[in-house]
Image: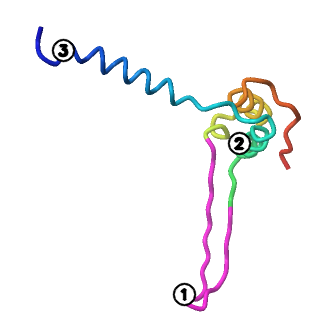
Amino acid sequence: MRRGAATRPILAIAAAAALAGCTLPPVSPERAAVQCEERAREAMGPRSRIAVGASSEDGPFASVQISVSADALAGRDPLEVYETCVIDKTGAPPIRPPDLS
């Protein structure tokens, strides 16, 4: 047997054990609802943000930001995005309907 070949299974077992310890604990249902509402809002379509102002150091400034989520590009229903997200985070269905306003 070549040197190092015997250590490969040990490294594989150690890596698997390390990855198994990386799972996140479930999120509280209320926290999941808040996080998933934001994701569902993003699935509703492109979002934009505009800022205009002035600074005594730099003078006037303006910025525009446009973002589109993968869910919006895929045309996913925001309510489906919300429900799937909550189930992924908690392992249970949502405790309340989303507030997408």
Q: Position of residue 62 (x, y in %)?
A: 62, 76
Q: Residue at x 68, y 30 (%)?
A: 26
Of the pair 28 and 32, the residue shown nearer to us: 28
The segment highlighted magenta reads 49-69
Q: Amino acid at mark 1?
A: Asp
Residue 88 within the magenta-colored segment of the rendering: no
Residue at 42 percent across and 21 percent down: it is 16
Q: Which residue is mark 3?
A: 5
Label 2 secondary element: helix
| Picture quadrant of residue 89 | top right
Instruction: Name the secondary structure under disc 1.
Output: loop
Question: What amino acid type is highlighted by mark number 3?
Answer: Ala
Can you say whether 47 is above or below 43 in the image? below
Taking depth in this image into account, of 47 and 20 the one nearest to the observer is 20
- Percent coordinates x, y for residue 71 in the rendering: 65, 37
Q: Is residue 51 magenta?
A: yes
* Dominant secondary structure, magenta: strand
Q: Give the Cα distance between marks 2 and 1.
A: 35 Å
> How many residues crowd mark 1 within 10 Å: few (<14), some (14–19), many (20+)?
few
- Horizontal and vertical percent for residue 20? 50, 23
Q: Label 2 sits on what residue type? A: Arg
Q: Is residue 99 left or right of residue 48?
A: right
Q: In the image, 16: left or right of 41? A: left
Q: Give whichever of discs 2 and 1 has the lower sequence position.
A: 2
3 vs 1, front mark: 3
**Image x and y of residue 56, in percent:** 60, 91
Question: Tag 3, which secondary structure?
Answer: loop
What residue is shown with label 2? 39
Q: Which residue is mark 1?
A: 58
Spatial CA span between label 3 and label 1: 62 Å
Q: Residues within 10 Å of mark 3 (few under 14, many from 20)?
A: few
State the image quarter where residue 85 is shown: top right
